[in-house]
Amino acid sequence: MKDRSPFTPGNPVPVELFVGRTNQLEEILRNVKQARTGKQENIFLAGERGIGKSSFAKFVCNMACKERLLSVHVFLGQVTSLDEMVRRVFEELLKVSNTQSWYGKISGYFENKIQQIDLFGVAVSFHPTAEDTRELVNNFPEALVNIAEKIKTEKKGLFIVLDDIDAISRTPEFANWYKSFVDKVATHFDYFPISIMLIGLPEFRDNLSRNQPSLMRVFRVVEIEKLQEKEVKDFFLRAFNKVNIAVQESAMEIMIDYSGGLPTIMHEIGDAIFWIDEDGIVKDDDVWKGVISAAESIGKKYLDPLVYRAIRSEKYRSILRKLGVTTSFKKNEIVAKLTKEEKAVFDNFLRTMRDRGVIMIDQEADRGTYKFVNDIYPVYIFMEGLEHKMKVKQHS
Ligand SMILES: Nc1ncnc2c1ncn2[C@@H]1O[C@H](COP(=O)(O)OP(=O)(O)O)[C@@H](O)[C@H]1O
Ligand SMILES: [Mg+2]
């Protein structure tokens, strides 16, 4: 009987199944650890949706903890106000401290300034008054230093992750606030044992440079990209091994191929296979079925309906297959592979795909180069093509 899949599609991966990212880990950890000497760092972690930013942050927090830094991972999602952002930061600090020996020291600090801390058993929620919130927003560095000071026998500093800042980073308030935060730290604090990591889509840089051009310089930008094949393999081995399922060599190759280095797809495929497999050995057959079922769920969960319909359109299906699993393609090179009928509709095809947000002109490459808006699209086309191929096979 199966009761629990080791795969976590859509949620940060558990630390024991985390793979890859060795260079980025080393770089970030080196910088985060500097907080212990009182040097502030501002990191910006950039990457596409689903590429593994939150998982990476979770892993870094875990390591930072071992280095005696109090680490908090704050999700900002749709948050667009500084008040709510700051409230969440302090609420998270209270939550991670709640069961720790130093909790009294920091909750005391909050109680003096802030009226209401609700305690439900071990859960904490934090509801400062509007006035107190304003003060936390305006005196953010002071408040953080104060907390670091209170717990300095237990912790050598703080590591704060602000995840999903895309919505708030579009507001001019955020950029201005962050700029004055950094300036204040630089001018008023010789010792500031707190590092901050912001996480968002690569467009974040454009938002910032529009709103506060000089701010971009303070960030150390770290980028996360696709996983390598050997990392994907390592992941599948570890995940299936965890539930005592063996994987045949050829089956492994197909799983790696169809994952396209994308962690989200890797988990969707793995999860589908986990439930399909009946004998504790993953064989080719399980993988084919798994890929088809994963394509189904990826289409529904991660693709915009317009994109989804464009990619599945009967009219353009054969052209889509010819683009192959690449992130970008040259118009001329594709035209050379097309049949007469396909050539006739190719310009229409390009226009439709652009209108639907599937592809865009690649400004950085030669003329006539297009790229997929999201790396997941070409991989999805590849996966979805499998279902089509199987159907054709059954009919013939
Ligand atoms: N390094 C990794 N090793 C294994 N699985 C990962 C890794 N990074 C991400 N994942 C998985 O990929 C999916 C997307 O990861 P997530 O961290 O939520 O991405 P993002 O925050 O960039 O949107 C999740 O299912 C997660 O479990
Ligand atoms: Mg995330």
Image (tube, rainbow, N blue to C red):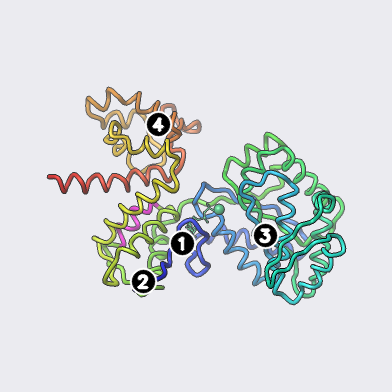
Which label sits in the foreground, 4 or 1?
1
Q: Which of pointers 3 and 2 lies earlier in the amino acid sequence? A: 2
The residue mark sitting in front, 3 or 2, is 2
Q: Is residue 119 above or below residue 306?
A: below
Mark positioned earlier in the residue sequence (1 or 2): 2
Please, what is the three-letter code of the amino acid marked with disc 3? Answer: Asn
Closest to the camera, between mark 1 and mark 3, is 1
Q: Is residue 192 left or right of residue 229?
A: right
User: What residue did someone put label 1 on?
Assistant: 8
CB contact under 8 Å: marks 1 and 3: no
The numbered dot on residue 353 is 4
Q: Nearer the viewer, residue 204 or 166?
A: 166
Q: Is residue 109 left or right of residue 53?
A: right
Question: Callout 4: 10 Å neighbours few (<14), some, many (20+)?
Answer: many
Describe the element under mark 4 as helix, strand or loop: helix
Q: Nearer the viewer, mark 4 or mark 2?
A: 2
- Residue with the mark numbered 3: 31
Q: CA distance from mark 1 to mark 3?
A: 29 Å
Residue type for callout 4: Met
In the picture, residue 351 is in which quadrant?
top left
N-terminal of the pair, mark 3 or mark 4, is 3
Q: Quadrant of the N terminus?
A: bottom left
